[in-house]
Image (cartoon, rainbow, N blue to C red):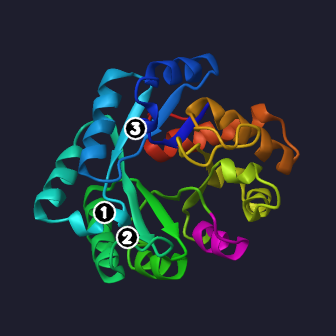
Amino acid sequence: MIDSHCHLESRQYAGILEDVITRAREANISTMVNIGTDLPTSHASLALADKYPEIYATAGVHPHSATEFDSKTKTEIRDLLQNPKVVALGEIGLDYYRDLSPRDIQKRVFREQLEIAAENDTPVVIHVRESFTDAFEIMSDFSSKLSSVVFHCFSEDIEAARKIFDLGWIISVGGVVTYKNATMADVAKFAPLQSMMLETDSPYLTPTPHRGKVNEPAHVRFVCQKVAELKELTPQEVERQTDLTTNKFYRLVETFG
């Protein structure tokens, strides 16, 4: 099973990371994609990927850190993307919930990073929170230039999901799908299984039955089980298809069967 989106460099894992990795292995988690949110975490993600064979990294600047994005950052992101263990650009996007960076700067930085992805034919991991309309409008300008796009921890409605699928893009489902009365459950039930990846967003958004504790990649199995329940499939069927989708998205294997 694959955890398509986690943050193992987070301070919540200080002193316990080896235990977290061990529990992931014991839970048969074959691959973990560690997501960069600024330059330091992007470099830290690559360091983890270099240390652990089952970990891959991404590089990018989250909207919260948009004010830190400058020409030097842009160059370093481009350089990081040349490493074979850096498998995507992200997470990037717009966040109007916390609004930690001015919205005009968020939009500019989002566009600049989408341009990098288009130039390099790089998969893109998108963060959108209370900003889907603006984000999708910006991304529509790149619809013919971006081959692989995932909206991570998707929190919009079915209509928004349909727009994403119509462009050949996909969504990622996290622990929120296990929460009582979660809109995400309706979306996960509606979404084609082949248009979906599974994630934890560790250390955040811990799924039931561990909600309230620090999340970790081993818990992605609870997301898988919930999706299987919603779709009336076996967990093995969900795991097989979502792993295939994730491997294709991040280009982790060269052939698919």
Element at badge 1? helix
The tag earlier along the polypeptide, 1 or 3, is 3
Residue displayed at 34% across by 78% down? 107
Q: Which quadrant of the structure image shows residue 200?
A: top right
Distance (Cα) linking label 1 and label 3: 17 Å
Distance (Cα) linking label 2 and label 3: 20 Å
Residue displayed at 37% across by 66% down? 63
Residue displayed at 32% across by 22% down? 51
Is residue 162 found inside the magenta-colored segment of the image? yes
The tag earlier along the polypeptide, 2 or 1, is 1
Whether the residues at callouts 2 and 3 have beta carbons within 8 Å, the answer is no
Is residue 81 in view?
A: no
Q: Amino acid at mark 1?
A: Ser
Q: State the residue position of label 1.
A: 65
Is residue 247 in view?
A: yes
Distance (Cα) linking label 2 and label 1: 8 Å
* 241 horizontally vs 67: left or right: right
Q: State the residue position of label 3.
A: 11
Q: Name the one closer to the observer, 65 or 134.
A: 65
* 173 horizontally vs 141: left or right: right
Q: Amino acid at mark 2?
A: Leu
Q: Say which quadrant the C terminus sits in.
A: top right
Is residue 254 found inside the magenta-colored segment of the image? no
Element at badge 2? loop
Would you place residue 75 above or below residue 216 in this image? below
Whether the residues at callouts 2 and 1 have beta carbons within 8 Å, the answer is yes
Residue displayed at 31% across by 58% down? 61
The tag earlier along the polypeptide, 2 or 3, is 3
